[in-house]
Amino acid sequence: MELREVPEPAAGPGNVKIRVMVASICGSDLHIRHGDIGIPMRFPVVPGHEFSGVIAEVGAGVAELKVGERVTAENTRSSCGLCPQCAAGSYNLCRKRLATGYAFDGAFTSYVVVPAVRVHRLPATVDFQSGALTDPSACAYHAVQELTRIDAGAHVLISGPGPMGLFCLQYAKANGGLVILAGTAKDTRRLELGRKLGADHILAGDGLEEKIRALTNGKGVDVVLECSGAEPAAQMGLNLLKHQGQYTQIGIFGKPIRFDLDQVLYREIRLTGSFSQKFIGWEQALALCAQGKIQATPLISHTFPLTDWEHAFDVFERSEAIKVVFKLEHTT
Ligand SMILES: [Zn+2]
Ligand SMILES: [Zn+2]
């Protein structure tokens, strides 16, 4: 990765050009930097898919959106529109899906071009910083609301108190779940924020599995939301699940791991992954943010100019940071 001068893009038919105000580093951007991303890439590319900004130009055929509107946008850039997943509205799972910030130029720059159909307006009470975090919030919405059932009073274990874990925590609490947020000894700051955002218990360090078992009177948890992408956390979550519990994988491991599927069989565990998000998740995430029910800004621990990108990435990789964002300086 390096900083380069690139030509200013033009909107083109069906697209809008957005002047980027805030862009946020995602965990998957770290995987891009390390070269172990599982999402189709086309190089050279401008990364960055979590952003907010102002519409600077609308392309031909775009009637719905106007220059000057405050917006954010989904990262699905293109999908085939014909496969069973697309036909069912799950374009996040299209085999031919290509995404902004991976296969198309993204938002770690001054202007980004996206299809008008992927644009969402920011409600008046949602600032640019919160708007830029709609992507991870919508991911958490997809994982918790669309793919995982959380009954009021259910014990929910969230492993990994990073941005995804902290958004999932807020959705789990909105459903009335009792949330145990678990991390490592390095996660003190993230866990403390988790407590402020409503976690019933925060735990880290040695003997986690025994501590969590004790918290549930030996019964185990009803739901695991695995947000860390760490093998020991996945195994611990599986060990702690009740019979017929729900396990949802949200964190990315970046490599195959050991995971005892016999336990899934013997205990009739329901197992699902969660990937990306869909249109309704974006609208709901923004509406909930506008009402203050899901909070994004407390997650922002660091702000940098784009010229300091290397430092920003390094800070994000260390656990003392939570969400690291770029604030774009516009001279015109
Ligand atoms: Zn992301
Ligand atoms: Zn498709």
Image (spheres, helix red, strand yellow):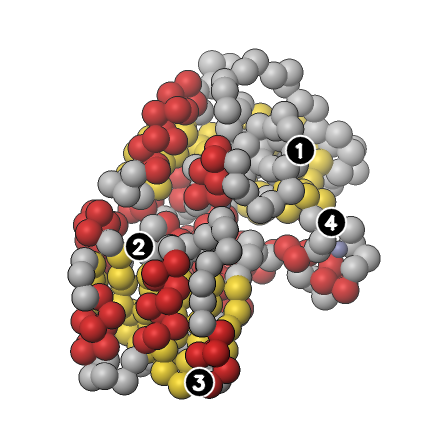
Disc 1 marks which amino acid?
A: Arg
Element marked by disc 4: loop
Please name the residue that numbered disc 1 is placed on: 42
Residue 273 relative to residue 137: left or right: right
Q: Nearer the viewer, mark 3 or mark 4?
A: 3
Residue 165 horizontal/vertical position (percent): 36, 57
The residue indicated by pointer 4 is 96
Residue found at x 46% / y 85%:
266
- Seen from the viewer's position, the closer of residues 162 and 70 is 162
What distance separates the C-alpha of mark 1 from that of mark 4?
13 Å
- Left-right relation of 20 to 171: right
Closer to the N terminus: mark 1 or mark 2? Answer: 1
Q: How far is the residue under mark 3 from the one under mark 1?
A: 42 Å
Residue at 35% x, 38% y: name it. 317
Q: Earlier in the sequence, mark 3 or mark 4?
A: 4
Q: Quadrant of ligand 2?
A: bottom right
Q: Quadrant of residue 152?
A: bottom left
Q: Amino acid type of disc 4?
A: Lys
